[in-house]
Image (cartoon, rainbow, N blue to C red):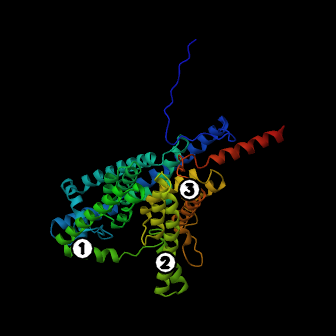
Amino acid sequence: MRERAVRQRPTEFARPVPSGERAMPTPHRRLATWYAAVIAIGAMICACVRLASTDQSDFRTYYYAAAAFEEGRNPYDVASLRPRSGGKITHGFVYPPHTLLLFRPLLRLGYAGAYWVYLGAKVVSLAMLVWLWYRFAPVASSGIWALLVTALLGHRQSVLLDIAAGNVSLFEQVLLWAGFLLLVRKKEVAGGASILLSSTFKIVTAAFGPMVFLVGRSRRALLTCLALTAGLCLCFAASCALWPSLWREFASAAMALDERARLNPSALALIRDIGERAGAASSTVWLAYGLCCAAVAGLWLYAATLAWRIRDGRPMVYLAVLAYALIAPRMKDYSQIVTLLPTLHVIGAVMGGGPRSLLACVILWVPLFQGRLVFGVPVFQYQPLFVTLWVFVELVVWLAARRGDRDATLGPLEDPLRGLSRMCAVCRASGIRQAR
């Protein structure tokens, strides 16, 4: 009887099972499948409830701001937007003037048609983002459910909040992660262009421009980074020259933003809340924020020197994303989307699937004690900040433990709760023995 030879395609991220480690037996896999299905179904129910109440208030502002711009009125003045919107505008336009040109084609559809086109584009962008995450990590078959749950529930449903609000964060994230994926595949020009293009709306993401060099690590990558940065500066300079008065209005609108806690769980917002409660002076608050930024920057610099020696560019990308989220003066609730993949990947690949992974997943997926105050400060509303800090430290420790290993890799994103099924199986086996 002839036996058919089965050829297996080798993969870059295949992880052999060590000799002392046994593969997960069938009962464990069955239990893991059940809890993964329960969590995934719960996440989908939360998604349906969230999307059923969407009104895309941010998109309403974008639409009528573009209409005001086309009619020669001030798009940054809320009072000038309300008459045509029926008084439903709650906040003004807070992006650079050139971004209004992107919404002008939607004016031809009317608000109702533009609403559904924009919402459809958001759903498509979510699918694209999850696919980019899947390609970037990469994701093992056992970790796919966790990736989907994180996309729906991570950081207090930040992705669903973005879709419900009609913000542009999902589009920004697609460009950003497409750029990161291209960079780790040694396509510096396309990757850098995609990253810098993501700063069209929110200029702060231009801070990721140096990743072209930090991941590419060559003279060509450095020259590409400098050329792309110069091109971006020229584009913004041209925009300022075309609409100088609107840029002044934009700067005023951006400086007037002051959100904290649930809407803006950033380090600066937390320090300001604590400082106000303690009666500290403004200079003391800013000094404390500066010290926090210096500590994060110092840790990042130390870890970046270690990640530089590793061929795999993913740890360098994750370090930059997590450090950015920790020191950014403003991190809206839906801006936390940028940290979802690094957080989940570190939990699944570094923490080992034990109790620490379980606790980290709970903090990542479940809002805890959101109404509780600690000495008058809504500390628990800064939950995304705390889990980001925890994962950042875990990644730094992981890099320190692999100093000098050029072939070190985070490996695939596996089931972050794989230890839970093993613990349940052990408890079940011990119960059966006692019954006998």
Q: Secondary structure at mark 1?
A: helix
Task: Report the residue that reaches farthest toward the left.
Answer: 71
Looking at the image, do the residues carrying marks 1 and 2 touch, with CB atoms under 8 Å apart? no
Q: Is residue 157 visible?
A: no
Check disc 2 and report the residue beneath it.
289
Q: Secondary structure at mark 3?
A: loop
Which mark's residue is nearer the viewer, 1 or 2? 2
Q: Quadrant of residue 329?
A: bottom left
Q: Secondary structure at mark 2?
A: helix
Check disc 3 and report the residue beneath it.
404
178 or 82, nearer to the observer: 178
User: What residue is rendered at 48% in x and 32% in y?
Assistant: 9
Residue 201 picture location, percent across and down: 31, 63
Check disc 1 and report the residue beneath it.
247
Q: Amino acid at mark 3?
A: Gly
First of labels 2, 3 by sequence position: 2
User: What residue is rendered at 38% in x and 62% in y?
Assistant: 210
Q: CA distance from mark 1 to mark 3?
A: 48 Å
Q: Amino acid at mark 2?
A: Tyr
Task: Report the residue that reaches farthest toward the front.
Answer: 219
Q: Amino acid at mark 1?
A: Trp
